[in-house]
Amino acid sequence: MSTTPRRRRHRWSLQARLITAVVSFVSVILITVGLGTGTVLESILRENLDAKVTRVQDTIALDYNHRADQILGASRQERGTLLVVNNLAGPTAAYVDGDGDVRTLDTRKIQVSAPDGNSWADATIAGLGDYRLRIGPYSSIIGLPTSEVTSVSARIVTTVALLTTGGLLVLAAVIALLIRSALAPLRSVASTASRVAAQPLAEGAVTISERVPEEDTDTHTEVGQVGHALNTLLDHVETSLAARQRNEERMRAFVADASHELRTPLASIRGYSELSLRGIRQAEAGGGATAGAVAETTRESLERIQAQSLRMTALVEDLLLLARLDEGTELVYSAVDLTRLAVEAVSDARVAGTDHDWVLEVPDEPVIVAGDAGRLHQVAANLLTNARVHTPAGTRVTATVTTEGGDAVLRVHDDGPGIDPSVVHELFERFSRADSSRARQTGGTGLGLSIVKAIVEGHGGRISVASERGSTTFEVRMPARPDSPAQ
């Protein structure tokens, strides 16, 4: 079944719609006022005409022994006056023409139909036009033409029409200027949005310099609020794009570091395997004389291969752990006694670092948190190991557990040389090291603190570091409650 696409209707601009709406509304008002005024004025003019007819009737002395033309001639009435009299000879009619002369009129041209009981009537008299008539005694009729009323009404309607048309044109021009001025900020907003939309925002470093001008962002007006909101949105977008760019750079650095970390043990494994194979080939060629030396070389090579394999396995496991923590699928929650966990971690650290001075400060009561016991133990162990590896022998390392304001707090403090201030802000980034060189005597994958941060944040907590010469403190804060952090 085929469908015909609907034709998109042409939509007017907001300015055109506003002008049309205002002008249409005002025009309806003006036309209504004009019609009402014309109707009232016409009614007043007709009342004046009726009064004039009545005065004419009062000034005419009807004499049924004389004809209508004789009566009009004797009374000197104004031009257009019409008189019909039923005298002894029958009905006669006369009128005063434009020159003031009295002329007779055929009564058959006068067809008067007045409603019952009404002494007023309107009639059209052939050759003379429309008349306002009053029927008097004995069917006498006196009337005046309505041409003056019609003429005045026509002039009023014409004047009102001209004034209305002119007023509407002036109004449309003024409204157009006002609306155009009022919508100028909106056009500025649309222009800014169009320029931003034309920028390539999909990839690479992006800086959005376009903004709505300050004069078009007055929050006291509706259009200004739109401009202010767009500027705020662009600020947020620019911040998000900068964060995306930083993430992309970190990802590239992460891939490069991970590739380097994997390449080194792989190269060692390849080298030692080739050495072993070369020794085996030499043993096969030389016979039993070199078998002992080859066996020793092969054993050492296999040990190095195993060591490098373990190093590579540790790196891969750390990467997988970070991936699972990012997905939120690694942690298994239960009630964990942070005090006991710190005691066990410090005990392990004493065994590994006999040349350091280890101090433990914990409260008498358990400090319970909701978390994954194994991963939290890894946090404490990593922080203690970090303090041991990066400080000289004789350094005092203090582990403290306490509660502050509803938070469980674990602190690891040492009085070592401190951390370089230039790398403190990126200390928890993946593969971040205080020493930027690739060579390390301390071993490890460079992921320890990033794993610690991921575990802590996965528990709804936060980790921070404060360091200066002679004092470095890592602080971990988590909700002190035996419930799930999600609750």
Image (cartoon, rainbow, N blue to C red):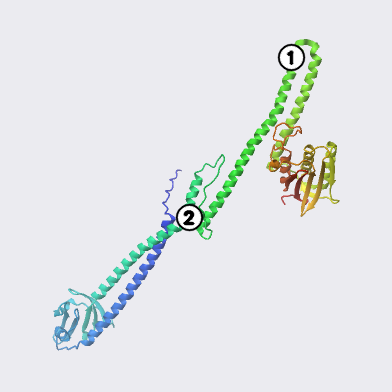
Q: Amino acid at mark 2?
A: Pro
Q: Residues within 10 Å of mark 1 (few under 14, many from 20)?
A: few
Task: Using the image, determine if residue 439 lies above or below residue 149.
Answer: above
Task: Using the image, determine if residue 93 lies above or below residue 428.
Answer: below
Location of residue 359 (image quadrant)? top right
Residue 115 visible to an observer of this rendering: no
Location of residue 165 (image quadrant)? bottom left
**Side of 280 where 135 appears, left or right:** left
The Cα atoms of the two marked residues, 1 and 2, are separated by 84 Å
Q: Which residue is mark 2?
A: 185
Could you tell me which secondary element the residue under label 1 belongs to?
helix
**Side of 319 where 75 appears, left or right:** left
Could you tell me which secondary element the residue under label 2 belongs to?
helix
User: Residue at image x 74%, y 14%?
Assistant: 281
In front: 480, or 438?
Answer: 438
Q: Which residue is mark 1?
A: 281
User: Residue at image x 80%, y 16%?
Assistant: 293
In front: 455, or 227?
Answer: 227
In front: 357, or 342?
Answer: 357
Of labels 1 and 2, earlier in sequence is: 2
